[in-house]
Image (spheres, rainbow, N blue to C red):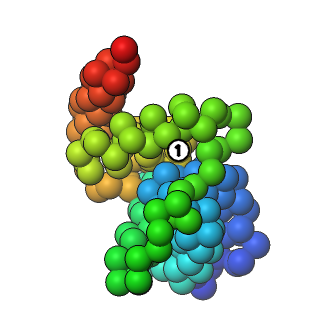
Amino acid sequence: MSPRSTTPAEFEQRLKPLLNPAAAYAYAILTNRDDAEDAVQDAAVKGYLALGNYDPSRPFKGWWFAVLRNCCRDLLRKRQSRPSVPLGEMEPAAPPGTLAGEFDDLRTALARLSPTHREVIELRYFGGCSYREIAAALEIADGTVMSRLFAARQSLAALYRKASP
């Protein structure tokens, strides 16, 4: 698949079902809805322009999430160079269907995980990626994904046990 052989409509057809999980994944990383939307839009453009780098033998979703992950990282770097905003103005709202306190607890626990563990959790549960897609996005073996997810879940459970009265 290359940009010359893929029409915008074909790319949109592959990308469209991934937009909601992509937005959730970007939001989990950036914790700001506007930045998450910007990252998804930027990734869509960059993804289409970089289709020549996509290996069709690998999952498209994993490749797409790798592009999105890089766009999120770029926004985080830009955010660090911006003047600081009072914390209250940067707090994201809880996702629909969750209690604000539960979301805060989860966000706090995720922030305490190692970056490696947080990344596989975000791809799996916010991005909805399979083990194979996570492996493609992170360019690691499937077995490594399984062991990282196991360790990340154990760490997350331990953090919740400590926080529980």
Decide if residue 65 is in sight here.
Answer: no
Who is closer to the viewer here, 1 or 86?
86
In the rendered image, which quarter contains the N terminus?
bottom right
In the picture, residue 101 is in which quadrant? top right
Q: Between residue 26 and residue 102, name the one nearer to us.
A: 102
Which residue is situated farthest in the right direction here? 9
Which residue is drawn at the image coordinates 26% and 51% (left, top)? 115
Label tally = 1
From the viewer's perspective, is residue 129 above or below residue 4?
above
Q: Describe the element under mark 1 as helix, strand or loop.
A: helix
- Disc 1 marks a residue whose amino acid type is Phe
Q: Residue at image x 39%, y 71%?
A: 76
Q: Is residue 141 left or right of residue 22?
A: left
Looking at the rendering, which quadrant does residue 141 occupy?
Answer: top left
**On the image, numbered disc 1 is attached to which residue?**
126
Residue 87 location, x and y as percent?
Answer: 46, 63
Q: Where is residue 100 in the image (x, y as percent from the top left)?
A: 60, 38
- Quadrant position of the C terminus in the picture: top left
Q: Residues within 10 Å of mark 1 (few under 14, many from 20)?
A: some
Residue in the picture at 62% in, 69% down: 34
- Inspect this view and state whether residue 82 appears: yes
Q: Quadrant of residue 41?
A: bottom right
Residue 86 image offset from top left, x and y in percent: 47, 69
Indicate left or right for 97 with 161 as reference: right
Provide residue 156's location: percent of width, then percent of height. Answer: 33, 29
Q: In this view, does 154 lie above or below 110?
A: above
Q: Is residue 135 left or right of residue 28?
A: left
| Residue at screen point 32% across, 55% down | 138
The foreground one among 39 and 162 is 162
